[in-house]
Image (cartoon, rainbow, N blue to C red):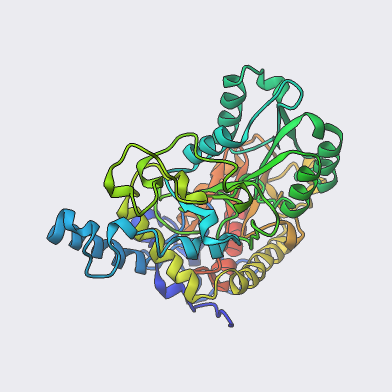
């Protein structure tokens, strides 16, 4: 299947400049960037769509999700409680996840029974750590990324403290080497080899939220398992972004949110994976009625008999509106051919954006970033396409001088929406389902225009 630049853009509702951007400067007054020629598509007007490159933070709204949510609202208003068992669209609320789990399993490379859609990311992370982090006096440490997402850091620290350990001793953090911006694979593997007998849990993000680095999940998992460690992953920035094979890689567990590349909406329902090898060995420590066998769930009996696999860990009935939103997005993924063609297109878009940035007179190679005295930027995302997803993180220079804040505001005025990470980084993510080559050209063009204005 060939995914053209406009194939699925029309299936999304993208924000417009009138709604979210303050257009203060007429494009013709700024002059023309040396990167690309001005065209009508690249002229921001109040009624035109933004160049939305923020799918790594919140995905755009799928039109299909709007339709499914409205259908559920209609069922609720007309049938009320009867919608649990009688549904005009074939999605009774007691079975609302039946159409979601197979699609989600395909996204993460798992069997449907290894996947569960439930709750929120950090709650699921705690649930999985309570299940799989079993420290002893000899093996109690957690190995993670030095700059993990803060919620993960808080979870790790609270978990080791609850087991009576000091986070300063029990948490091993691996960061980039001096003067570098991303973590070397050999440093992760060497640490596992050296410290493996003390490590209870290896738990990285699949992709670094900050740099966009895609960690070598297969080799890290294999090395961790060989040293007797449990290996889990936080896939918040990986799911729907890069191809995953959780079952094949022998990952023990994984957790993720769905509101980034999976476009389920703000605070959308989350998910987790538990490898089938744990069936029968790990039963839910914190049971809830929705994890009860479907045959007996509504008999309301006192004995808990969990559904085999990950879905036995369900606790409460899922929020139908958030499930409908996720289902709409997953159905769009399915029509697009899932991760194969999307990954191919993602590499093309991210590679083109990187190439255009390299042509900018304001670009500085990472190794020379510390020498820059005038406003400029470097890219702190790995240049190897196999070590990143649909994200480039730009570090603005000189660091600590407020350049990033001015650039971020300037880009927004020109209709380019990314997100900032204080004090000096802007993340831009050309998402293959709805971003185009023209979006990429516009982002590079207006970054040049804004930096020139400084």
Question: Closer to the camera, 349 or 442?
Answer: 349
In the image, 51: left or right of 369? left
In the image, 240: left or right of 117? right
Image quadrant assignment for residue 168: top right
Residue 153: percent from left, percent from top: 60, 31
Residue 376 visible in image: yes
Question: Closer to the camera, 61 or 392?
Answer: 61
Residue 195: percent from left, percent from top: 82, 32
Give the tally of numbered discs: 0
Residue at 52% of width from left, 54% of height from top? 115
Residue 380: percent from left, percent from top: 71, 49
Residue 177 visible in image: no
Residue at 49% of width from left, 67% of height from top? 28
Q: 390 above or below 235?
A: below
In the image, 58: left or right of 136? left
* Residue lying furthest bottom: 1
Image quadrant assignment for residue 156: top right
Residue at 47% of width from left, 76% of height from top? 335
Q: 156 above or below 63?
A: above
* Residue lying furthest left: 78
Residue 241: percent from left, percent from top: 59, 60
Q: 8 above or below 329?
A: below
Question: Closer to the camera, 445 or 177?
Answer: 177
Q: 307 above or below 34?
A: above
Name the quarter where the N terminus is drawn.
Answer: bottom right
In the image, 120: left or right of 182? left
């Amino acid at each position: 299947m060939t995914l053209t630049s406009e194939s699925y853009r029309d299936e999304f509702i993208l924000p417009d400049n009138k709604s979210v951007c303050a257009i203060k400067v007429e494009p013709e007054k700024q002059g023309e960037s040396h990167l690309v020629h001005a065209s009508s598509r690249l002229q921001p007007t109040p009624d035109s769509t933004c160049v939305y490159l923020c799918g790594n933070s919140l995905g755009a709204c799928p039109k299909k999700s709007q339709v499914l949510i409205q259908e559920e609202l209609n069922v609720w208003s007309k049938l009320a409680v009867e919608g649990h068992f009688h549904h005009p669209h074939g999605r009774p609320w007691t079975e609302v996840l039946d159409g979601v789990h197979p699609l989600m399993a395909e996204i993460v490379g798992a069997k449907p029974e290894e996947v569960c859609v439930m709750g929120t990311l950090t709650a699921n992370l705690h649930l999985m750590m309570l299940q799989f982090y079993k420290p002893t006096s000899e093996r109690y440490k957690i190995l993670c990324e030095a700059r993990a997402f803060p919620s993960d850091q808080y979870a790790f620290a609270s978990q080791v403290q609850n087991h009576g350990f000091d986070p300063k001793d029990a948490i091993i953090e691996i960061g980039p080497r001096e003067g570098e911006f991303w973590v070397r694979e050999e440093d992760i593997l060497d640490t596992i080899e050296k410290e493996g007998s003390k490590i209870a849990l290896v738990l990285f993000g699949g992709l670094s939220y900050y740099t966009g680095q895609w960690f070598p999940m297969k080799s890290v998992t294999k090395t961790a398992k060989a040293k007797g460690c449990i290996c889990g992953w936080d896939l918040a920035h990986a799911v729907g972004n890069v191809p995953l094979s959780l079952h094949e890689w022998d990952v023990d567990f994984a957790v993720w949110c769905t509101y980034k590349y999976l476009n389920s909406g703000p605070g959308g329902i989350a998910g987790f994976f538990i490898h089938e090898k744990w069936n029968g060995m790990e039963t839910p420590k914190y049971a809830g009625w929705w994890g009860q066998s479907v045959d007996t769930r509504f008999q309301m009996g006192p004995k808990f008999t969990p559904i085999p696999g990950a879905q036995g860990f369900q606790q409460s009935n899922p929020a139908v509106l958030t499930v409908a939103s996720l289902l709409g997005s997953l159905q769009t993924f399915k029509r697009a051919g899932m991760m194969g063609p999307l990954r191919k297109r993602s590499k093309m878009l991210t590679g083109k954006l990187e190439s255009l940035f390299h042509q900018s007179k304001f670009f500085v190679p990472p190794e020379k970033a510390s020498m820059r005295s005038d406003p400029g930027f470097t890219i702190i995302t790995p240049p190897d396409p196999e070590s990143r997803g649909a994200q480039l993180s730009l570090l603005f220079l000189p660091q600590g001088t407020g350049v990033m804040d001015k650039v971020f505001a300037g880009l927004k005025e020109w209709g380019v929406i990314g997100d900032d990470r204080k004090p000096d980084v802007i993340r831009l993510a050309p998402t293959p389902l709805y971003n185009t080559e023209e979006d990429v050209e516009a982002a590079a063009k207006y970054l040049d225009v804004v930096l020139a204005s400084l």
